[in-house]
Amino acid sequence: MEHLHELINGIKPKRPAGTFRIFLQEKAKKYELKDLQDGKQKWNELKEEEKGEYLKKSHTLSLAYKYKKMIFEKKIRKIRPKKPPSSLGFFMKEKKG
């Protein structure tokens, strides 16, 4: 629902967390970490398959971010006023006519 709220209201999407940060957040929710050094140690002890799971989550969040960013930029282009012509533009228009 949070994602829909962002898209509907034109709120600029936030960049997703990286693989290591996702790992830290999950472990912190379960109170399995003492500090950052403990988190680094547990990350280094993970098997490649387990790291792959976090990589997939990170990739999914990244794709969702790119999609939301694309929609946000399309909305902004519609709303943003056009720039006025420059003095060179006025000059060229006069010379052409």
Image (cartoon, helix red, strand yellow):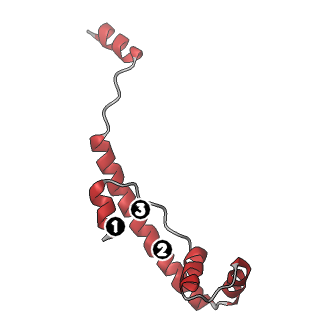
Amino acid carrying mark 3 in the image? Lys
Which quarter of the figure is the N terminus placed in? bottom left
What label sits on residue 3 in the rendered view?
1
Image position, residue 95 (x, y; %) = 32, 8
The answer for how far apart the CA atoms under marks 3 and 1 are is: 12 Å
Q: Which residue is mark 2?
A: 59
Q: Which mark is residue 16?
A: none
Instruction: Looking at the image, tell me whether mark 3 or mark 1 is earlier in sequence order.
Output: 1
**Dots 1, 2 in contact, CB < 8 A:** no
Task: Kindly state the secondary structure of the residue where label 3 is placed.
Answer: helix
Above or below residue 13? Residue 96 is above
Residue 35 position, x and y percent, is 70, 80
Q: Residue 84 in the image: x percent, y percent?
A: 34, 24
Tell which circle, 3 or 2, labels the residue nearer the N-terminal end: 2
Amino acid type of the residue that numbered disc 1 sits on in the rendered structure: His
**In the picture provided, is 23 more to the left or to the right than 7?**
right
**Which sits in the foreground, 19 or 90?**
19
CA neighbours of label 3 inside 10 A, class few (<14), some (14 to 19), many (20+): some
Which residue is depicted at the point 25% across and 9% down? 97
What amino acid is found at the position of numbered circle 2 in the picture?
A: His
Dot 1 crowding, Cα within 10 Å, few <14, some 14–19, many 20+: few
